[in-house]
Structures are given as structure tokens and as C-alpha cells.
Amino acid sequence: MDRGLSQTAFDAAPASAGGVTRTLRRRSTPARPLFETLPAAVAPRIQPSLERRRLWERRFRRRLDVTDAVSITLAAAAAAIVETGPIDTFADLAGPARIGMFVVGAWLTLLWLARTREPAVLGAGAAEYKRIGHATGLAFGILSTIFILAQLPGLRAQLLVAMPFGLVTLVFSRWLWRKWLIHERERGECVSRVIVAGARDDVEYVIEKLVGDPHHAYHVIGATTTDGLIDPIRVGDRGYPVIGSIRSTAAYGRATGADAIVVASTPDDDRDFVRRLGWELEGTAAELVLCNRLTDVAGPRLSLRPLDGLPLVQVKIPEFEGGIHAIKRGMDVVLSLLALVPILLLTPVIALAIKLDSPGPVLFHQLRVGRDGRQFWMIKFRTMVADAESSRDSLHAQNEGAGPLFKLKRDPRVTRVGAVLRKFSIDELPQFANVLRGDMSIVGPRPPLPAEVTAYDGTVYRRLYLKPGITGLWQISGRSDLSWEDSVRLDLRYVENWSIATDLMIMWRTAKVMVAPRGAY
């Protein structure tokens, strides 16, 4: 019962005591208003920082909506034209047009249900393309069932024409938008304005990773730390301001217009810090990102399992045999067979150029170390003079390679034709024969020399758990320009996190690196 109403009724009513009737005096204290609003119960409202973030996300998603619809409509229309063939009147297009509209609607619906335009995957590349592929496969699985049950015509054309054409067009359009988004982010647009919170060492580590992100998705505007110091955090040749204590992160985020908070670590004496910070950021930030030091663990190996309010991060342990490795081997065999056909056609031309440039054999055989430490002879087109190995010791003092690697940017042993072959990685084409033979894989760690392996420590030996590759993360990330530590880190990351999707991504990026080479000498 409402207190204000009950008290008024009580004051106005007569009361008796010992048979004597008397009237109670009305109290002078006014009752609380019936619909009074409690300030603490008011839901947080969207702040300008969050509205600014959502504005560019909405604009970008609308552009994706348009290009997705155009791509799918063109694919469905092409299938309808193939299905009908020559037409006499426009009435002949009515049936295929209805089927095409049905396909377009179902396809777009599945793209929406698969969250292919979520902010988390915008510009993410492989994750975005994977969702598009899953949505497309599911859409046509459902459509095939409906077509068969309803005995609708046009299924074959939609499967053989619309699905592959539409999928390729969708991925290509998303790739173009991703390039545009990265360009905008390089200009400082369409980025998340970030404050990094945590212990100073952890904040420095996270900032280093964020600013090194090739997608430029995060713009660090400052940091809050646990030590109470205001000295800037230096990463490379740039300093990032420390704007206050970690306990006031939300207030500083609101004052600076940050739309994302990255928690590098939490205060040791405050286990509820993250939950309270999430409450304080409501209406202000779009993201609260929690970091951990599980370095080089890729997303597919991580999963979140809530257990009675306790979020458990599960990390899948890598496996180095089984069905997925059989699929990788099958893909290696098929692709190497397809690649060797044009390579054999080009070999006479390349061989003639090598012979005319310098005397010696066309092919160069070098002993390398493969999976499980087994040695094999790797084949390449010769790019150096015939006696290059014997003159290596005299050039050892000029070595510019990192760690145990021997590299010279201007190696006098490289021939003129060899320099061209190296620049565009043509010298490595015969290695497809190594792949077919089973010594190598198309994608894998860099194949090391036996002398390099003898210098390995216990960690680096993990590079030998998989077959070495013609290409890999090391090749698309700078090749000879990489430090020894970076080369090892990339190889170990690949060994622990590889997948078929990762291999396809590396192959695609390798093709781009061959056209615009970097670090090849």
C-alpha cells in the first residue's frame, strides 16, 4: 500500500480509546509525490562519443547493404537468364524473375542472420569472408530443400551460376570496401578512440600491438595506470599520455570522447573492477576489451564458456595429425599439380635466360630440414653464380641477416637474371615438385638450413612440427626484412594456429606480394 495514501486516510479517521471518541490531529509533514523519479534509477543515455561511433558504423553498413543487394541480384538474374535462354516475350521472364526474387530475399536474410555486417567483423578480412561463406552455404542448403519439396524450377541454374558468381562478387565487393575502410582509418576516420588501462608494463605491451595493427582500427588517445605516475608511455619513438588513475578510467573516457576502453590488466586489490567499469561506461563507450597475455593464440582456438557467472576462456591445444592435416595434404597435391603445368611450360624460357646469363646448372639443390627434423633436397631455379657456396665464407663478415641467417641485400654472387627471379619469387616455383613429393607444403614455416637448426633452442624446434612451406606468414610479412625474433614468432604462430582458411588467406596475400615484392633479395 502506498505510504502517502495510507497516512492521509489514517489522519482523517476518528479513533476511540476507552469509549471516548477523539479526532486525531493531521500531521504537517507532506506525503511523498506519487510518481517521484529516483535519479539512481534513470537508464544511461547515449553520449556524443558513442553516437559518433555508431554514426560511421551505420553509414558503412548501409553501403554494404547496397553492394550486397546488387551483387546477389546480379547473380540471381544471371542464373535466370541462363535457365530461360532465348525469350520471345517479357512474359517468359515472369517465372524466373519470381524465383530470382525469392533467392535474393533468402540470401540477404541469411547474410543478416549470420551477422556479416557486425561492427566486430567490419574490415576484419578472413572473419568477415568466413561468415559470408557460411551464410551463402546455409542459404542455398535451405533453398535446395524448398525447391525440391515444392518442385520449383531453376534450382540447377541457381546452384551452378548464382551461388559461385554471387559468392565471388560478394567477397570481392567486401574486399574493396575493406580497402576503403583501411584507407579511411589511415586518415584518422572510422577508428575507435581508445584508452588503455592497466599496469604500466601491460599498457605498453597492448599499445605496441594496437598501433602495429595493419588495419588501423584503434587510435590510442591515452592511458590510465595503476602506479599513479603521469610519465608518458613510450612505444617506439612516440609517447602516449597517461591521463590519470585506472580507477577513474570511465570519467576520463567520457571527458576525452573515447568510445573504446582496453583493459590491459586490473588492480590487484579490486576483483570487481571490470564489472564496475562496464557499468560506468554504459552510454559512453561501444567496446570494453579485456586483454590477456596468451600471445599468438588465434581466435579459432579461443572460446568463452560461462560457468555460473564465471567466464572461462578455453584454449584448444594444437594437434599435429588427423583429418584436418589430411585435407591440407590433399589440397597441396591438387594445387601443386595445377601449378606444375604452367611452370613446366615456362621452364624452357627461364632455363634459357639462366644459361645465357651465367654458366652452370639451371636448377639449384640445397639441403633443408623438414618436418620432424628430416632433411631433404629443396629445388630452386639457380639465381647465383655456380660457385656461390664456396665463396660464402669470404662474405661472412658482411652478413646482414638476422640471427643464424646469412643474407646480403647486394650479394655479389647473384646474377642479373637471378635478381629478377628473386624479386618476384620465380626462383621458388620448382618447389611445387617438393610439395608433390611430400617434403614441403604450399603454406608452412620457412624451410631452414641444417646449420640454422643446430642453433635452435627448445622453443624454436616447434617450427619443425609441420612441413615447411613455399610461402607462409614470414613471406607476406616482410621476408628478409624481418628480424630473427619476428621470423621465429611468425612461424610459431602459424604452427600453433594454422587452418585451411588461414592457408587460403596466405596464398592470396602471397600473390599480391609477388606483384609488389618487399624484402626479397
Image: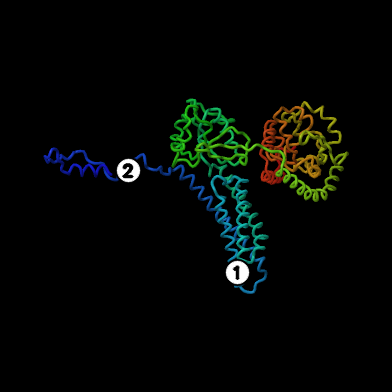
The percent coordinates of residue 456 (x first, y second) are: 73, 28
What type is the residue that disc 2 sits on? Thr
- Residue 199, disc: none
Image quadrant in which you'd find residue 186: top right
Q: Residue at horizontal 82%, vertical 30%? A: 392
Q: Which residue occupies the extreme bottom position in the image?
A: 88
Q: Are marks 2 and 1 in contact (CB under 8 Å)?
A: no
- Viewer-proximal residue among 162 and 397: 162
What type is the residue that disc 1 sits on? Gly
Cα distance in 3D space between marks 2 and 1: 60 Å
Q: Is residue 369 above or below residue 182?
A: above
Does label 2 or label 1 sit earlier along the sequence?
A: 2
The percent coordinates of residue 38 (x first, y second) are: 33, 41
- Decide: few, some or many residues near mark 2? Use Cα within 10 Å; few <14, some 14-19, many ≥20: few
Q: Is residue 439 left or right of residue 289?
A: right
- Decide: few, some or many residues near mark 1? Use Cα within 10 Å; few <14, some 14-19, many ≥20: some
Mark 2 secondary-structure assignment: loop
Image quadrant in which you'd find residue 299: top right
- Viewer-proximal residue among 354 and 74: 74
Read off the residue under disc 1: 95
The percent coordinates of residue 421 (x first, y second) are: 78, 42
Q: How is the image coloured?
A: rainbow
Q: Is residue 118 left or right of residue 345?
A: left
Q: Residue at horizontal 43%, vertical 36%? A: 255
Q: Is residue 181 above or below residue 226?
A: below
Q: Quadrant of the N terminus?
A: top left
Mark 1 secondary-structure assignment: helix
Q: Quadrant of the C terminus?
A: top right
Q: Which residue occupies the extreme left position in the image?
A: 20
Read off the residue under disc 2: 37
The percent coordinates of residue 109 (x first, y second) are: 55, 56
- Viewer-proximal residue among 15 and 192: 15
